[in-house]
Image: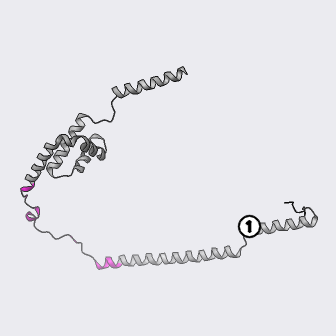
Amino acid sequence: MHNLLTFWINMLIAHFIGGIFMKRQDGWTYEDDICLSETVLNCIEKGETQLYAFDLVAEKTNRTPAACGFRWNSNLRKRYEGQIKEAKLKRKQTQGIKQPKLSAAIPSVKPYAPEIDIDQVINSLQAIKDQLEGMRVTIANLQNRNAELEQQLNSKPSDVTEDMKNLLEIIRRAEKLGLTNKEKPAI
């Protein structure tokens, strides 16, 4: 009893002391929080999604994007509300400046379409036709083999029926010799 009591006292002490002095190994560090917040703010400013920012931070910190999103939404977003507004304003300002379209600078180019040679088409179709004929022959052979096997199965008595016949014959012989008990059981 004393050992059991000592065990539980030690467990409680370890639990309370461990809870006070121990820190999670996978907890977010100050540097991780800074990396996450700067990346999210940069992505907002550039017009990219927060999900993209979470993917980037996940690679840097060896966490999942979901963990990064949870950390941002549960802890950091409130701290950076002012910077988020500034980043959104910068995004609107940069989007307000029209960038020259690349399509206007590049002359129109027709997409490349290889010339189709009629002989190649004919050869391809002939090869497909040959494959189809080969498949038809294979199917016919398999159907014939299947029919043969079904015929063998139906014409040949099964081993079970042969065994049953032999057993019945042994019982009949035993009855003739008087080896079986012909009395009916009392129920």
| Depth check, front residue: 16 or 51 | 16
Quadrant in which residue 20 is drawn: top left
Location of residue 30 in the rendering, given as x and y in whole percent from the top left corner: 23, 34
Quarter of the picture holding the C terminus: bottom right
Question: Is 38 drawn above or below residue 123 in the view shown?
Answer: above
User: Is residue 159 rendered to the left or right of residue 142?
Assistant: right
What residue do we see at 61% from left, 77% from top? 147
What residue do we see at 49% from left, 21% from top? 6
Find the residue positioned furthest to the top. Answer: 2
Quarter of the picture holding the N terminus: top right
- Numbered disc 1: secondary structure: helix
Residue 119 part of the magenta segment: yes
Q: Main secondary structure of the magenta part?
A: loop
Q: Is residue 9 visible?
A: yes
Location of residue 66 in the rendering, given as x and y in whole percent from the top left corner: 30, 47
Location of residue 22 in the rendering, given as x and y in whole percent from the top left corner: 34, 28
- State the scheme by which the image is colored: one colour
Residue carrying label 1: 160
Q: Is residue 58 visible?
A: no
Quadrant in which residue 120 is drawn: bottom left
User: Is residue 54 rendered to the left or right of residue 41?
Assistant: right
User: Is residue 153 rendered to the left or right of residue 141?
Assistant: right
Q: Which residues are magenta?
A: 95-122
Question: Is 24 drawn above or below residue 127 in the view shown?
Answer: above
Question: Which amino acid, mark 1?
Answer: Val
| Depth check, front residue: 139 or 69 | 69
Query: How many numbered marks have been drawn onto this rendered protein structure?
Result: 1
| Depth check, front residue: 13 or 144 | 13
Location of residue 67 in the rendering, given as x and y in whole percent from the top left corner: 30, 44
